[in-house]
Structure formats: structure tokens, C-alpha cells
Image: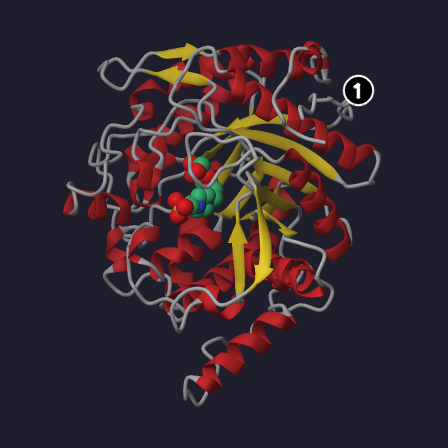
Amino acid sequence: GKVVQCLSNYTFPPDFRFGVATASYQIEGAWNTDGKGESIWDRMTHQHPDFFFNGDVAADSYHLYKEDVRALKELGVGVYRFSISWPRILPTGDVDVVNKLGIAYYNNLINELLANGIEPMVTMYHWDLPQALQDIGGWPNQVIADYFEEYARVLFTHFGDRVKLWLTFNEPLSFCAGYGEWRAGAPGIDAHGIGDYMSAHTVLHAHARVYHLYDNVFRKKQKGQIGITLDSEWADPFDGTVESKEAAERELQFQLGWFAHPIFSSEGDYPRVMKERILNNSLKEGRTRSRKEVKYVQGTSDFFGLNHYTTNLARSGAVGETPSLIRDAGVQMILDPSWPSSASAWLKVVPWGFRKLLVWIAKEYNNPPVYVTENGFSDHGELRDTNRTKYITSYLSELLKAIHEDGCNVIGYTAWSLIDNYEWMSGYTEKFGMYYVNYSDPARPRVPKDSSRVMAEIIRTRQLPQQYSQEDDVKLGI
Ligand code: GBH
């Protein structure tokens, strides 16, 4: 039967921050303009033009950033989350060359935002590693943490007087997979069960280094906040069996706990279930040591950045090759065919999973302040994007219940995304923007979709528009 969408009447707390998000490689273009160095995404897309689209031009935000700010202003956002391209600032990855024009671009963007009353939230790394650093091994090589710290120092030095919200990494879970599976993104290295774990180890270390750098050198003067953004689906037990409940819990530990437990838990270190299973499998594989090592990086985040899009059903079972992360997790993840779809095969509309994940994080990590740094819906670029509006409003409704009924400390929300952009392995086929961009028009005009008007209304009224609870006949939530 039909389930009518029922939106919460709660209002957003007075200090709740609203915004939208983007990432450098997905919007900027100008891949080799004004001294920018090559990134691992430039290299991979250029080497495999048959397989990947590229972000050579993208939405051309390098030249059109004022159009982006105009759209942000129209939305009425308080915050704009964007990322800085490491090779645009440091073309070789190292501080031997600091690209003045790259610094100037981000200065212009930041100043334009501030002039319009919008606070910048800056991600230091949204996947575009300088190719020169990949040439010496990339993230599996722990020396990359040194380079990341020096890069961060350049960012704090040049932008920290005006940027008060920093994120070190966007979604380590996603980009470490680039060192596990060819199909998972740049650099496309097939070393599952080894390269991905090694990368994660460096990334956690690099994150902690930059947090401590901020604490020791910049925080007192600049008075900002610094965190990390982790991504996780919700894993709901496939059925009522103990095996499925344990599998769902295990899946959350392997997705979110992998990075969150070392940083946010009172215990520190990787989740116990992960260490045990990886060690057991490593021994079974005839190895003399675990494929994973241990490191403590506790307490190195002022808030918990969370990207969340969708839910899966989890049950215990063998999946993936030996060795691999998914083999170690031992969880089969299943999409319920009754859940509404998007343009992305992996993205089903399951708003209640969002609330469950927020509650899980609050319990697991002693209710940290959570900043939802991404959440959004893909379609094919429709201007009348009713399904995006339904997605955003129903997920925000669950977020409000998590705040008001479950006591979760959710402090902000930046929707993915401001504009249609380069969607990684899917090129320009899946659109997440609240603004449409015509990719066959060299001028790349930004055109508001219906969802942008609803978002503007939510930001202005600080509550959800009630008409969407009346007209809805799509099963969006219970
Ligand atoms: C975010 O990742 C990214 O931060 C952002 O850049 C991106 O544009 C946005 O999502 C929308 O995708 O193709 O079946 O192998 C969200 C987490 C992890 C979701 C990788 C898609 C690939 C699934 N993503 N996952 S599949």
C-alpha cells in the first residue's frame, strides 16, 4: 500500500548551519590553467578516455565562481562547502613551488563569499592528489602524511585569517578504495585488502598531523574549527536473526568505524571486530602478520563531518575476493526493490536510515557535534526536480527527529550539490545539482531547479514546507 510522506513540524535550532557543497575536480575545470599541476584524476581520465569522462572543463567554476556565489546568495545559505585543489596550490605536491595564481583564485572565491555574507567551509582533500605524489606511491606511502601537513600549513597561512571551518579529508572510505579496486576511482590500483588498508593508515595519521598543526600553531590566532568528513550508508539487518543483526553492526564498523573509531571513540584504535577478522583472515591466508597495523589518533576532530546518502540491508555471508575489505567484513549488502530509485544504482531513497545512523553515531561516539557535510539525490537534470525536493525534505525531516526526539547533536547540513557537476565514474550522466548546468553550452549557465527554491524556503523559514507532506504519494518513509 501507499505510505504518505509525513514531514516533521519541528524547526531547526537557531544556530543550525545551512549550506550546499561542491568539490574542486567536480566543478572547477581549468585543469592545466595558470600553473595548476596534474592530479591523479587528470592522469586517469586522460589515460583512459574510452572509459572515463573528465573534469577538464567541468562547470568551469575556475572562471565562473562569481556565478556560483550568485546562486549561493539566491539560496540564502550561511555556509558554502568547497574543496581546494592541492595541485592548483602546489603543482609538484611539495612546497618548492607555491602557485601564486592558485592562491589568488581561492582568495577571490573566499573574499566573494564573505562579501556576500557566506561562510567558507574548506575541504583540503576531495580526492585530487598531485600526480607527482602518486609517482612516489600515493597514500599507501606514509611519507605522504608529511606532504599533506606542509600543504595544510600553506592553506592555514594563506586562508586561515578568513576560513574558520576546515575539513582535512572528504570520505577516506571512498578514496582509499582507489588503492583497492581499479573500478573505484583514481589512481585505480588493484591491491584490495592491502593498498586500501595501508592508505587508510596514512590518511588517519595525516589527519591527526594537521589537527595538531592547527592546535599548536594556528588555532590560538585564527580561532577556527577543524574536522574530518566520513561517509557511511546505514546497514539495516536483513531479517530478525542474530546473524543479520551482527552483520549490520559489522558493516557499520567496516564502513564508518574504520575511520571514526580511531578518532572519536573513547577506546581509540581501529574497531575490535575489524582487527580480529583481518588478523584471522590474514593468518588463514598464510601471512605471518595482519594486513593491518595499529595507530592512535584519538580526539583529533572538533566535530564529526558526515556524508550520508542511502541504506542497505545487511546479512552475514561471504563476498569479494581474498584478500579484500568486503571479504574481511563478511557482509552481503542488499537493496530492497521497494525503495524508490534515483539515477545512481547505489542510491535508494530511505530517509529513516539517516535517523538510525545519526542515533548510532551519537551512541557509539558519545554524541559528538555532527555536521552533515553531504546528502543529496541524483536524477537526469530535470528543472522540475520533484524527486530531489522529496528526498531533501524527507531526509531533513528525519534529521529534525534525530535532534528533537533522540537528542542527537546535529549542528549543520550542506546539501550535495550546488550545481550539476562531474560525477566521478559516472561522468555527467548523474546530476545532483540544485542548479542545472547545460554541459553543451560553453557559457555553462547556472539555472535554478525547483529544489533550489524549496531549499531557499527551508533556510529562510527554518522549517520544512508543509505542502510537501500533503501531495506526496511516493513511499519515502514510515
Ligand atoms: C559523495 O560520495 C562524494 O563525496 C561526492 O564527491 C559525490 O559527487 C557524491 O557522493 C555523489 O555520488 O558506483 O556502485 O561502486 C558518496 C559515497 C561512495 C557513493 C562510492 C557511491 C560508489 C558506488 N559514494 N559509491 S558504485
Relative vertical location of residue 207 with respect to residue 290 in this rendering, above or below: above
Residue 76: percent from the left, percent from the top? 59, 14
- Residue 49 as seen in the image, left or right of residue 407: left
- Per the image, label 1 sits on a secondary structure element best described as loop
The residue lying at 75 percent from left, 30 percent from top is 400
Image quadrant assignment for residue 458: top right
Residue 219 visible at all? yes
Position of the N terminus, as image quadrant, is: top right
The residue lying at 71 percent from left, 39 percent from top is 355
Residue 80 visible at all? no
The residue lying at 84 percent from left, 35 percent from top is 405
Q: Nearer the viewer, residue 466 or 419?
A: 466
Q: Nearer the viewer, residue 35 or 374?
A: 374
Image quadrant assignment for residue 436: top left
Residue 452: percent from the left, percent from the top? 53, 14
Label 1 environment density (alpha carbons within 10 Å; few <14, some 14–19, many ≥20): few
Relative vertical location of residue 308 with respect to residue 116 in this rendering, above or below: below
Quarter containing ligand 1? top left
Position of the C terminus, as image quadrant, is: top right
Q: Given the image, on which type of amino acid does mark 1 rest?
A: Asn
Image quadrant assignment for residue 34: top left
Residue 328: percent from the left, percent from the top? 50, 70
* Residue named by callout 1: 9
Q: Nearer the viewer, residue 20 or 301?
A: 20
Query: Looking at this rendering, what residue extends furthest in the front direction?
Result: 1
Residue 132: percent from the left, percent from the top? 24, 56
